[in-house]
Amino acid sequence: NAGVTQTPKFQVLKTGQSMTLQCAQDMNHEYMSWYRQDPGMGLRLIHYSVGAGITDQGEVPNGYNVSRSTTEDFPLRLLSAAPSQTSVYFCASTTWGAPLHFGNGTRLTVT
Amino acid sequence: ELKVEQNPLFLSMQEGKNYTIYCNYSTTSDRLYWYRQDPGKSLESLFVLLSNGAVKQEGRLMASLDTKARLSTLHITAAVHDLSATYFCAVVTGTASKLTFGTGTRLQVTL
């Protein structure tokens, strides 16, 4: 029972590069979301999805794109990496009334 | 805009003592979650509070929700070193995947 799987675990990018953070869940959850965690700021919502084909912006969406072509997958794309995007990224999934299940996180450094 | 405030931000307590962490939020919500995070790890769900007056207990931790006061508390009874971690409350706004997190309370239990 894998739960929420994120890859990669660590990534270093140069400013201006693009990349995709992968997220997959095997619990058939309809809701999925991406958060970033920065020291002293808790977790902030980047984008979320309420089902396949439906996505919406969260609190800090600028510089990120998402898509949800299947129930299982919810990749996060960084279009042109900036040092301000250095952070730990968590993907999560849930169903109504249940807590979010979080992946193990991706630690991203942009130099 | 929903704001979620936790206090204290840092708590150092001796083993065997009791203490309470407070979570205040600024707009109406009837769903609140508590999470625990160990350093360098993902978030682990502790409690799901789904209605006014909800009280949940697990071991030395007890959480409650007062939706009228927009307040949740996490009470620690007879703290032990293993409870040392950062604790987050998170309030649902809109869909189940859209949470607003507090900034976290770092708990340090000393011998």
Image: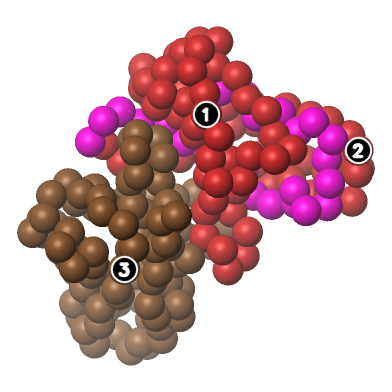
| Res. A16 mark | 2
At a point 47% along the width and 26% down the height, the residue shown is A49
Span colored in magenta: A72-97
A20 sits left or right of B11 in the view: right
Q: Badge 1 is on which residue?
A: A56
- Mark 2–mark 3 Cα distance, whole angstroms, equals 39 Å
Q: What SS does tag 2 mark?
A: loop
The answer to whether residue A89 is magenta is: yes
To which chain does the residue with label 1 belong? A
* Residue neighbourhood size for the residue with mark 3, other residues' Cα within 10 Å, grouped as few (<14), some (14–19), many (≥20): many
3D distance between C-alphas at marks 2 and 1? 24 Å
Q: Are marks 3 and 1 in contact (CB under 8 Å)?
A: no
Q: Any idea which chain is the red one in this picture?
A: A
Q: Are marks 2 and 3 on the same chain?
A: no
Q: Nearer the viewer, mark 2 or mark 1?
A: 1
In-image side of A83 versus A14 (left or right): left
Q: Residue at x 45, y 67 (%)?
A: B104
